[in-house]
Amino acid sequence: MYDAIVVGARCAGSPTAMLLARAGRRVLLLERATFPRDTLSTHYIHQSGVARLARWGLLDRLAATGCPPIRRYRFDVGPFALTGVPPAIDGVDAAYSPRRYVLDRLLADAAVEAGAELRDGVTVHGLLTEYGRVTGVHGPGLHERARIVIGADGRNSIVAREAGAEIYEDRGTLTCAYYAYWEGFQLDGVELYPRPGRMIVTSPTHDGRNVVIVLWPQDEFEAVRADIEGAFEAAVALAPGLAARLRAGRRVEPFRGTRLLPNHFRTASGPGWALAGDAGHHKDPILALGISDAFRDADLLAEAIEAGEPEAYGARRDALARPGFESTVAFAALQPPSPEQQALFAILREDQALTDRFFGTFAGTVALDELFSPAGAAARS
C-alpha cells in the first residue's frame, strides 16, 4: 500500500510526487513515456513558476542546463510596441523556456531523489475501486494500491475519466496552434505579436534555438494543416521585423501543432483521487500559463494532502487559476484591442514603470486588479 500513486511524471506529477516524498510519504510515480522524451507543449515558465523551482531547490539545476534566462518582454501591437521588465517575485526576476525533454527529466529525477519510486514506460488502463472509493490503479503488469491516486496525466487524463471528474466552466476551444524552432538569430527576451485573428510568440530556449508559435482561430485548422509552412509564413509576415529575422535564420525542427486546446475546469478531487495540472484544468496556450499553473497545483495539492484535507484543494485551485483563465480566454478570442485596452495602451506608452507592472500581470508577479496599485509589485504566490 502506497500513500500516493501519481499517474504522469511531467510538470504536475513529478513535483507533486517530490513534495509528498519529501514529507515522508511513500509515493509511486508512473509515466507512460520513457525519459528523456519530448512532448507537444509550450515550455515557458513564468517568474511565478520559476520562484517555485527556486523554493524547491531546483532553479540552479535548470540554469545549469544552459537554458537562457528571460527578463525582457516585448508586446508588439503593430503601430507601436511596449517593452519592459516585470517586477521580481521572491527575488526571482527571470523566466525560462526550457525544452520539455530537459525539464521533465529534471523534475522526475528530483522526485526520485526525494524518495519517490518512478516506473516509466508503464501504461495505466484503469482505477481500482472499493465501495465507491478509488483505491489504486491497474494496467499491463500493474496492480497497485494507495490511499490516494493523483491524476497528473494531462488533458486526456485516464484518472479523470475513470473517476468521473465532471467538466465545468467549459469555454470551448478557441484556437489552434503550430510551432517550430529556429536558430541563427538572437532574442533578448520573449516577444508577443497580437494581430487580428492571429497571435505570434517567440522566446529563446536551449541550444541557441528560438521557439516560434502561431495561433489561429479554431475554424481555420483544416486550412492551416493543409499548408502549415505557408500559413505560418503568412502569419509571421504580419510582424515584418520578426519575419526578417526568421528569414536570416533557419528552421531546424519540423512543425508541431494541434487543434485540441480546450478551456475548462474539472472536478479537482473525490473519494481517493485528485487531479493536478492539465488533467484538472486545461486552457489555451496563448499566455503559456500551463507549466507555472502545474507547479502551483503541485504545491496546493501536496499541502492539502498533508493537512488531511484533499477535498479543500479544488476551491483553492479554482480561486487562484480563475484570473489567468479569464485572461487566457480573452486573448484566445484573437480579437482587435477593445476601447478599454486601447486606453490602457495609451497610458502604458507614457509610463515605463506601469508598463513593467503590466508585464508583471503576464509573469504572475502582479495581480491584474492590482496593476495600478504599488502593492501589486509585492511578491506573490
Image: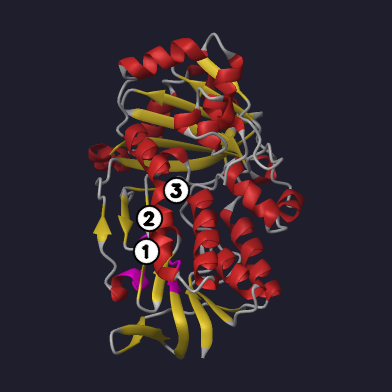
Residue ID for mark 1: 268
Decide if residue 337 is on the left or right side of residue 349: left
Amino acid at circle 3: Leu
Q: Is residue 247 visible?
A: no
Magenta span contains residue 153:
yes
Circle 3 Cα neighbour tier, 10 Å, few/some/many (<14 / 14–19 / ≥20):
some
Please tell me which residue lies in front, 43 or 341. 341
Amino acid at circle 2: His
Q: Secondary structure at mark 1?
A: loop
Q: Of the residues under marks 2 and 1, which one precedes in the sequence?
A: 1
Comparing marks 3 and 2, which lies closer to the viewer? Answer: 3
The answer to whether 5 is drawn above or below residue 190 in the figure is: below
Q: Of the residues under marks 3 and 2, which one precedes in the sequence?
A: 2
Residue 260 in percent (x, y) is at 32, 51
What label sits on residue 320 in the rendered view? 3
> Magenta part of the protein: which range?
150-160
Decide if residue 296 is on the left or right side of residue 67: left
Q: Quadrant of residue 227?
A: top left
Q: Is residue 359 visible?
A: yes
Please tell me which residue lies in front, 107 or 121. 107
Do the residues under discs 2 and 1 have CB atoms within 8 angstroms?
yes
Q: CA distance from mark 3 to mark 2?
A: 12 Å
Q: Residue at x 53, y 49 (%)?
A: 292
Q: Residue at x 34, y 17 (%)?
A: 340
Do the residues under discs 1 and 3 have CB atoms within 8 angstroms?
no
Residue 114 in percent (x, y) is at 68, 73
Q: Residue at x 39, y 75 (%)?
A: 273
Q: Secondary structure at mark 2?
A: strand
Decide if residue 307 is on the left or right side of residue 123: right
Q: Residue at x 58, y 30 (%)?
A: 375
